[in-house]
Amino acid sequence: TTPPPAAFTEAHYGEGHGDPEESWDILPAPERGARKLDFDLFSPSATTFGGDACHAMPAAHTVREWLRVCRSTSTIIYSPALRHPRARNLDRVRIQAESFLQLS
């Protein structure tokens, strides 16, 4: 049998950095134009996110925008995957992680 077609959108590009204050360059959530049309056509059924980079600003804000766009059609899957030594301000990271848990 042939598996059903799957759509995958890569939301980040570039390379991660060793400093948790620097993050992946995450593409903005599709709001209009061709990227929005592609997103609507593929209508992803699952959105997975996590890791050190999504907890650092400005990436954390961009991840929230993606979740806002994806929530209506997707199951949200969050994996904190935080590495303690890289997180400098653990209180801020905990607040961010708990906030993401509420969105997933």
Image (tube, grey):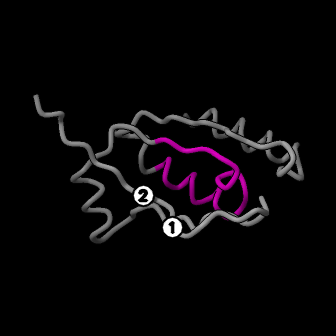
**For numbered disc 1, what is the local secondary structure?**
strand
* Quadrant showing the C terminus: top right
Residue type, label 2: Glu
Quadrant in the picture for residue 15: bottom right
Q: Where does label 2 land, which residue?
A: 10
Between 59 and 32, the one lying in front of the other is: 59
Quadrant in the picture for residue 4: top left
- Horizontal side of residue 64 vs 69, given as left or right: right
Range of magenta residues = 48-68
Q: What residue is rendered at 73% in x and 57% in y?
A: 56
Judge the density around disc 2: few (<14), some (14-19), many (≥20) Cα neighbours within 10 Å. Answer: few
- Tell me the number on the disc at residue 76: none
Residue type, label 1: Tyr
**From mark 1 to mark 2, how far is it between C-alphas?**
8 Å
Residue 20: percent from left, percent from top: 77, 58
- Horizontal side of residue 26 vs 45, given as left or right: right
**For numbered disc 2, what is the local secondary structure?**
loop
Q: What residue is rendered at 50% in x and 47% in y?
A: 67
| Residue farthest top in this picture | 1
Q: What residue is rendered at 39% in x and 64% in y?
A: 31
Eyeballing the image, is 31 above or below 39? Answer: below
Q: Where does label 1 land, which residue?
A: 13
Evaluate if marks 1 and 2 touch, with contact meaning CB atoms under 8 Å apart.
Answer: yes
Between 41 and 31, the one lying in front of the other is: 41
Q: Residue 66 colored magenta?
A: yes
* Quadrant showing the N terminus: top left
Residue 103: percent from left, percent from top: 57, 37
Dominant SS type (magenta): helix
